[in-house]
Each structure stands twice: as structure tokens, then as C-alpha cells.
Image (tube, rainbow, N blue to C red):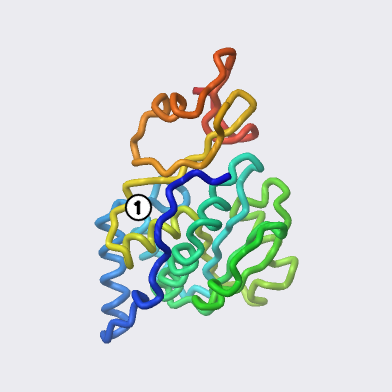
Amino acid sequence: EFIVPHEEHTDKSSRPTVPMPMEDLQHQTLEKIARSGLLAPDKSTPLAKWLKSLQERPTAMVVANAVPLEPELNTPLAILHLHPEQVFSGLAILKRLLDAEQAVMAYPYHFPVRHEVAHDWQVQCIPVSDKYPQGRRESVLATLKKQGHLPQRKSQLAVFDIQLLRQVERLILGGQLPLERVITISGDGVGQPGHFLVPVGTPLSDLLAKVDIHPDVALVVEGGSLSGRAV
């Protein structure tokens, strides 16, 4: 059961229809992203700097990867379940920013994706296996290539995670700074596992206090069981 607060989906009437040259619209979008402090998928480069470098070459495709990095880290699916409009519109915003030819989303084949919402934003949804490490950029691109969904010619591709796409939509269309994240807390020692929408910078101890950690828990891991670290 998802227990993050449910927010209103993006109103379709708020979709950008600004009567200005595309170049000016792209510049304004990039400026907003730069002021927000959002980071690129590598978590070390400013998102605006990375996007600007991508603009130097034609981008054939923007890809949303909704496959969790590890099975227990299903935050991407929680966000996609509750906020599909925000995710798909976030990808559409970046497609426009990069002048990409196509937008696709790779998702676990068992997940009930909202195809009608994806269609509204001209995003093609492609089911893939959720086998580890499909959540990684290289793995999901290899799968899409094997399935014949990537361009035949060697082209620039940009891959984004689901949480980042929602933050971009909230920033550009909602005017909200990215001051919150969805955090997943689960495991055998958690009495009330779930997905939590929390302010950035919330101490881990505060979150653990709210999920009824069992008193005999000996180890807390940040990240997944395969790639996480003990804290």
C-alpha cells in the first residue's frame, strides 16, 4: 500500500503553450533548472550543465527508466503509480528542451502503466524485464536495443530516472522547487514499510522512528541489499 500523500495530477490545461520562439522557451527552461540546484542522474553534475552539454549534439531519444535498481527499491514505481501525469510531462519537457526525436519509457512488464496518459504526452511505453541490473542506464539501453527500439544509427541518448522527471515537472509547470523526495523504507525489521514523501535533508533517524523499527534490528542499509551501504 502506498502511503505517500496523494497530490493532484498536473492539469492538462496547464500544458505549456507559450507563444515564443522555441530557442527562448528552451533557454527559460534551462535557467529555471539551473536555479533549482537539481543534479544530473550521476548525482554529481548539475542537471542544467549536463543538459546544456547534451544540447551541443542532436539527441535522438530521451528515455525514462522506471525499472527499480533493485527489487526492494521500488520508489520509481510508487511515483509512477501516484503521479503518472507528472512523470510523462516531465519527460516531454526534457524532450522539447533537447529537441529529441522520440520519448520512450522502459517499465517492468508486470506494472500497470497508464498508457492513455503516456499517449497524451507522446511517450512510447516499452515493457522490459525487471531482472537486475535493468535499472542501470547501460543495461536498459542494451535491452531496448535488443528489442529493436533504439535508432539504428549511432545516436545520442539521454536516460532519466522517474524521481528526477517528477521534480522537473513540478519545477517547470508547478513552480515548485525540488525540496522533497520519495523515500522507500522496507525490510524484515520494519513494522510499517512504505513510501514517504519527505523534505530533502530529513534525518534518517526521524524516518526510522516513524516506521516501527523492530528493537532487535542489527543493521540498517542505505540503498539496496546489493549496492547499499551500512549506516
> Depth check: 70 or 97 in front?
70
Question: For the point 49% across and 23% down, which residue is it?
Answer: 231
> Depth check: 153 or 228 in front?
228
Q: Position of residue 219 (x, y in %)?
A: 57, 19
Establish if 60 lies above or below 229.
below
Can see residue 203?
A: yes
Question: For the point 42% across and 64% down, which residue is it?
Answer: 9
Can see residue 56?
A: no
**Crowd class of label 1 (few under 14; some 14 to 19; many from 20; radius 10 Å):** many
Question: For the point 44% across and 53% down, which residue is it?
Answer: 6
The quarter in which the N terminus is drawn is top right
Q: Position of residue 173 (x, y in %)?
A: 33, 67
Establish if 70 lies above or below 161.
above
Q: Position of residue 134 (x, y in %)?
A: 67, 52
Count the marks.
1
Q: Which residue is mark 1?
A: 38
Which amino acid type is shown beneath numbered disc 1? Answer: Leu
Q: Is residue 144 left or right of residue 224?
A: right
Q: Position of residue 227 (x, y in %)?
A: 60, 35
SS assignment at label 1: loop
Q: Is residue 198 left or right of residue 144?
A: left
Q: Is residue 164 left or right of residue 141?
A: left
> Depth check: 168 or 26 in front?
168
> Depth check: 8 or 45 in front?
8
Establish if 6 lies above or below 106.
above
